[in-house]
Amino acid sequence: MPPPFPEAKITLDYPLYGCDFDPEDPGRLFVGGGGGMSRTGVDNKITSLDASSREKLEITGEITLRKYEDNVASLAAGQRKGRATLLYAGISSGADDLQKGKNEHFRVLSADQPKAAKSSVLGARISELSRTALFTTDDKNTYQRLLRLTQPFPTTSQLGAVATGLSKDPQVALFDVAAGSNVAPRMRGVLDLRSEAVDMDVLQTAEDRYQLIYCDSYNIYTFDVTPDAGNAVDTEPRCI
C-alpha cells in the first residue's frame, strides 16, 4: 500500500548519521555520514540534495572527507555567507591527533549554491573553513553526538549547542556562530552533566537570552543562557 503522502528517495553510497534542511531554502537538504576510520572502503562525505521535487531527490554537490578521520556524526545548516550556506558538523579527528589529546570535532563548512541545471560544472562546491575543539574532556572515545542551532536571522549570531557521545565526562558545550569574516565558533561555556544527553534543542527567548532543553534516558531538563556571567550559563539545570 503506498504511503498517504508524497515520497521521494535516493540511495547514496555511504551510511547517513546527520541531516538538515537549508533554513533559507526548504528545497535543499544536506546529509552526512560515512564509514569512519575503518578500512571498509566506505568514504566519509557530506552531500547536498535537491529536495524540491515530490518524485525524486538529486545530488547537487558533495565533498569527500579525510579517510583517516571519523565519519560525520552530526550536521546542521546555518546562515548564508554571501551566496553560500554555512554547515556545521561533528567529525572527530584522526587516531594520531586523538593520541596527542587533540580532537577538533567541530567543523565549519561552506556549501555553494547549486549551478544552473544546464551548467556543465558538476554540482555545488562544499569546502571546510574551520575546525575547533569545544569539549574539555580528555576522553579519546568522546565524539560530537548532538548538534543544535537557534533559528537564524540575518546579520545576527546564532547560539549553538553540542553534546558528547560515549564519553566518561558527559558535557554540553555552548557557543555562538555568525556569518561574518570569522566563522569559527565563539565559546560561551561548557556544562558538565550527570549523564549524557540523548536529545536536545535550543531556542531564543529574548535578545541575547536563550533556553536549552535536553533529556537523558529518564528525565528532561531546561536551563537558561544569559550574558550576565561572562556569556556563560548562569543557572543550574532544572528537571521538569
Image (tube, helix red, strand yellow):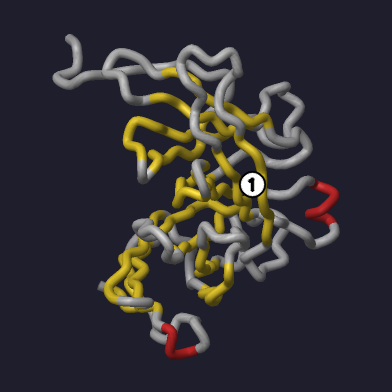
Residue 194 place in picture, x, y as percent: 48, 72
Pointer 1 local density, CA inside 10 Å: few below 14, some 14–19, many at least 20: many
- Residue highlighted by disc 1: 91
Q: Is residue 217 visible?
A: no
User: In which image quadrant can residue 73 be found?
Assistant: top right
Mark 1 is on which residue type?
Ile
Residue 212 place in picture, x, y as percent: 36, 68
Q: Is residue 141 left or right of residue 222?
A: right
Q: Is residue 2 left or right of residue 30?
A: left
Q: Is residue 198 left or right of residue 136?
A: left
Residue name at image x 49 percent, y 20 percent:
59
Q: Is residue 150 visible?
A: yes
Residue name at image x 45 percent, y 51 percent:
79
Frontmost residue, 19 versus 29: 29
> In the rendered image, which quarter contains the N terminus?
top left
SS at circle 1: loop
How many circles with numbers are drawn on the protein? 1
Residue name at image x 55 percent, y 59 percent:
164
Position above or below: 7 against 193: above
Frontmost residue, 195 versus 90: 90
Frontmost residue, 98 versus 32: 32
Residue 137 place in picture, x, y as percent: 67, 68
The residue most toward the left is 4
Q: Is residue 206 left or right of residue 57?
A: left
Residue 170 place in picture, x, y as percent: 55, 66
The residue most toward the top is 1
Position above or below: 83 against 213: above
Position above or below: 74 against 17: below
Position above or below: 33 against 131: above
> In the rendered image, which quarter contains the C terminus?
bottom left
